[in-house]
Image: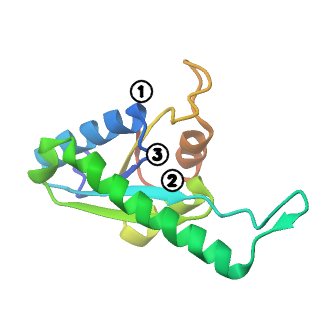
Amino acid sequence: MLKPTKILVPTDFSEHSDRALRQALDIAKEYNAKVYLFHVVPDVQRCVVDYCLSDVQVEDVENKARTTAKNLLKTQLENFPRSKEVEVVTDVGKGSTYEEILKEESDRDIDLIVIASLGKSGMAKYLIGDVARNVLKGAKSPVLLTR
């Protein structure tokens, strides 16, 4: 039987991600596990049409995105009283969302990923999202999809 000790919860701050976090916190409380709440900031496009950002501008945008994400992680946790009953670590990655999630899984030696089956884009009610699908395919640990 699976008794997780480290639970990774990727979030895009959507209602779907909130449900995944709620589920993960319940599991963490039950098994005295640590929760890793993780958000990925996408790479900044340097050029659009015929306009390009300088390295300094790109770095500034990325730093602001990371700071905003860190604040949103704190705000998201404040909506869940149970988060005070378990150990929660927050982190922000940068790059391809599913690749960063899988990297975080490996780096933190995660033994359960709890992820929303749909994210902000939530294109179709009954289809699994691209990120969740790629995490499911590439994960080494069990993945719990929530809806």
Residues packed near mark 1 inside 10 Å, few (<14), some (14 to 19) or many (20 plus): some
| Kind of residue sitting beneath label 2 | Ala
Q: CA distance from mark 3 to mark 1?
A: 14 Å
Disc count in the image? 3
Q: Earlier in the sequence, mark 2 or mark 1?
A: 2
Quickly name the residue at label 2.
139
| Kind of residue sitting beneath label 3 | Asp
- What residue lies at 51% left-to-right and 32% top-to-bottom? 118
Quickly name the residue at label 1.
147
**Quarter location, residue 79:** top left
Could you tell me which secondary element the residue under label 1 belongs to? loop
Task: Let me know if residue 132 appears in the view.
Answer: yes
Q: Earlier in the sequence, mark 2 or mark 3?
A: 3
Towards the viewer: 104 or 53:
53
Q: CA distance from mark 2 to mark 3?
A: 19 Å
Q: Earlier in the sequence, mark 3 or mark 1?
A: 3
Quickly name the residue at label 3.
12
Circles 2 and 3, Cβ within 8 Å, touching? The answer is no
Could you tell me which secondary element the residue under label 3 belongs to? loop
